Amino acid sequence: MNVVVIGSGPAGLSAAYFAALAGCRVTVLEQLSAPGMKLLASGGGKCNVSNTLQIEEFARKFGKQWRFLLPSLQKFHGQTLLDFFALHQVELIADDGFHYFPRSGKSRDVLNVFLHELPRCGGKILCGKQVVEIRVRSGMVADVKCSDGSTYPADRVIIACGGKSYPALGGTENGYILAEKLGHQISSLYPAMCGIHVAEKWVHECAGISLADCQVRIDLPKWRKLPQRGELLFTHHGFSAFAVLDIAETVARLKKEMPQIPLRINFTPDTGHEEWAARFALWRKTQGTKKVQTLLAGYLPRKVAAYLLNDPDVIVAHWQGRDREILLEKLLNCPFSAIGTDSWERAMVTAGGVSLKDIEPDSMASRLVKGIYFAGEVLDVTGPCGGYNITWALASGRCAGEAASQA
């Protein structure tokens, strides 16, 4: 049986390996000059493969369609995933008790498992091959045509060419175009896991400053109880890093409905109102001649402290009660207005994609065209930071690859 896999990311390589392992003749077609480029860049080159959550809790992090993920995750998640990589001499460890990375800290080791094992199973990867058409005859897949005119016979085709994000690493709309030609619906696409742009001009003056622990939330009823917490990086346009990456998709979606999305940032989530009030009282007793900015700079970068104060030059003795309350509010509940997100060039993940309604979750097979399967980011499935999306790619790839080999 000839199986053609479109894309050499984690979903495509997983699908290819497990189809080849089952005895299929597998060809992976990759548009770039080398395979797995986005995988190599993931996690800052360290590749956060997965995390320690149990299957159901893990799946629920993907939102309302979480049940769709379960058949794939039951094949390749948790100990099964750890054992697979250990078998191929890549140990995954969770030094922080949650995130699994290769012990070496190198994403190359994860990629090499598939690059070494796929040829041993009889599979091959062809680079510089952009698929432009999947040809169907009598309701069944027949072959795949590339932009260079080459064609490849196919009894099964697995579309695993990722999303639109990070075009420099292979991001493209090609998978959606191919799926749409086959009759599949594509839900709206949004950049996800990227920076957020804000209207407040002073933020760009702090570009490059990083705060180790902040809490960010969208200040709208549906999202107020879903704050994100972690590192916050000031950029030339707004904010980036873990505190905002997981809400970028929501900001992008809301931007279609409203010009500005209210945000609130707690710059000191481990220090509450009472503790700050007590600290200010102590300053008034013992530090009256010092500038408030100088004292505040003991807890926040000096430049950020200056912008949070109404008067950066005020000394403690002249600091009015109303100004103290304003600072408290800014420290714990500072308002910002999001006006958009980073572009596709900087988005790590694509939200939206091929609708799940015409995909069979037990096999990742198309319900519309016999012989078509899907895996990974090309589907309308998006998880948060923390190993979720790579695990989904690997799991859905395995599910598709095994199902394609058995159909």
Image (spheres, helix red, strand yellow):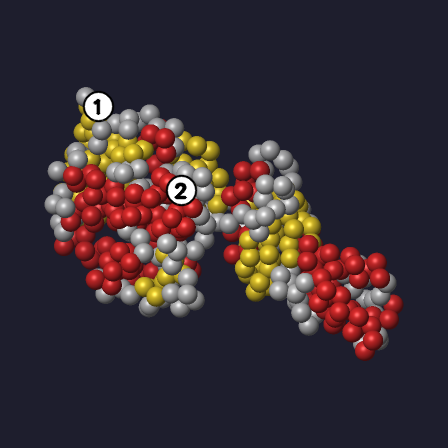
Instruction: Classify mark 2: residues with Cα within 10 Å, few (<14), some (14-19) or many (20+).
Output: some
Q: Where in the figure is residue 326, as x and y percent of width and height?
A: 78, 57
Depicted 356 relative to depicted 10: above or below = above
Q: Which residue is mark 1?
A: 139
- Per the rendering, the mark at residue 66 is 2
Q: Nearer the viewer, residue 235 or 290?
A: 290
Depicted 6 relative to depicted 118: above or below = above
Q: Taking 59 as reference, is 23 left or right?
A: left
Asked whether the residues under the numbered discs 1 and 2 touch, taking CB atoms below 8 Å apart as contact, a structural biologist would say no
The furthest residue to the top: 138
Three-letter residue code for mark 1: Gly
- Per the rendering, the mark at residue 302 is none
> What residue is shown at x 57% (from left), y 38% (from top)?
254
Q: Secondary structure at mark 2?
A: helix
Q: Quadrant of residue 222?
A: top right
Q: Is residue 43 visible?
A: yes
> What residue is shown at x 30% (from left), y 43% (from top)?
71
Depicted 58 relative to depicted 101: above or below = above
State which quarter of the image contains the N terminus.
top left
State which quarter of the image contains the C terminus.
top left
Q: Where in the figure is residue 37, as x and y percent of width and height?
A: 34, 52
Depicted 82 relative to depicted 263: above or below = below
Q: Secondary structure at mark 1?
A: loop
The furthest residue to the bottom: 286
